Amino acid sequence: MLLRSAASTHVGMRRQANEDRYAIVPGLGLYLVADGMGGHRAGQVASQLAAEAAIRAVEALRCASVSLAERLSHAVACANREIFTAAQSKPEFSGMGTTFVGMLFAGERLALAHVGDSRAYLLRHGRLRGLTDDHSIVAELLRRHEISEADALEHPHRHVLTRALGVRSRTEPDLAEMTPLAGDVLILCSDGLTTHVADREIAERVGDEQDLESAANGLVDSANRAGGLDNITVLLVRYEKDD
């Protein structure tokens, strides 16, 4: 099988700096998005550290006899430790953290790891399916049926996470493995996209566009036209037959 990928990121219409980071490392089969948070520049530092640490960790286990999910879990643990240590070392980095959503491909399988409210989706045969559950206060209230979808959009704590990398000495990612099919498109994104762009539009834009770069740029443009309240990052990976 052959992987094709593209990504697009934008500061948005309201922010002064882009605290999102993404990584595309075809040689390792690694694709990730991180959305940083913290004080002045700390969010940028956290997401950058997460991406760099994850890449190093996956590279270090390239030849190890462990599962894809175990490799990705190790990468998340290394990223968490790196950010937490940096946050302890400098007052200006205190409390910084980042979301993380990443995929690791090898052979006919992929592993997924997720912490925070960045998301992963699968587009298969024109149908979009969420692969992650947000780690946030509002998402937890929705799962308990204590608020409605409409309430969630205006909830005062809608951006408060219950899990993130670097905030504590240890964190547990949600992990999964699956077998992708030819034609599948995997979508990784920060909440700057999903705040403004509904799942239906994501499916339409990605499904109707063969050029992944155009699809990613189109989604970012849609989020900006809808207000662009946050940084926006979209990463697309298409699983194709290798002819």
Image (tube, rainbow, N blue to C red):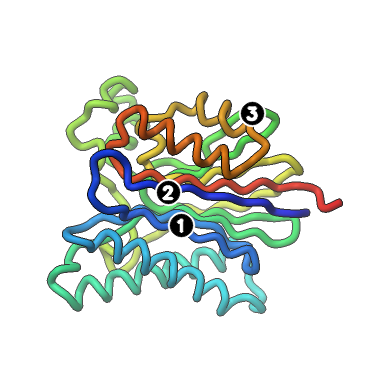
Q: Earlier in the sequence, mark 1 or mark 2?
A: 2
Q: Is residue 138 left or right of residue 173?
A: left
Residue 152 appears in which quarter of the rendering?
A: top left
Question: Helix, strand or loop at disc 3?
Answer: helix
The residue at the point 68 percent across, 41 percent down is 184
Q: Is residue 180 left or right of residue 12?
A: right
Residue 242 in picture, x, y percent from top left: 82, 53
Q: Is residue 29 left or right of residue 12?
A: right
Residue 137 appears in which quarter of the rendering?
A: top left
Q: Which residue is mark 1?
A: 22
- Badge 1: residue crowd in 10 Å (few <14, some 14–19, many ≥20): many
The residue at the point 64 percent across, 40 percent down is 211
**The residue under label 3 is which amino acid type?**
Asp
Question: Helix, strand or loop at disc 1?
Answer: strand
**The residue under label 1 is which amino acid type?**
Tyr
- Badge 2: residue crowd in 10 Å (few <14, some 14–19, many ≥20): many
Q: Earlier in the sequence, mark 2 or mark 3?
A: 2
Residue 221 in picture, x, y percent from top left: 43, 35
Q: Which residue is mark 3?
A: 208
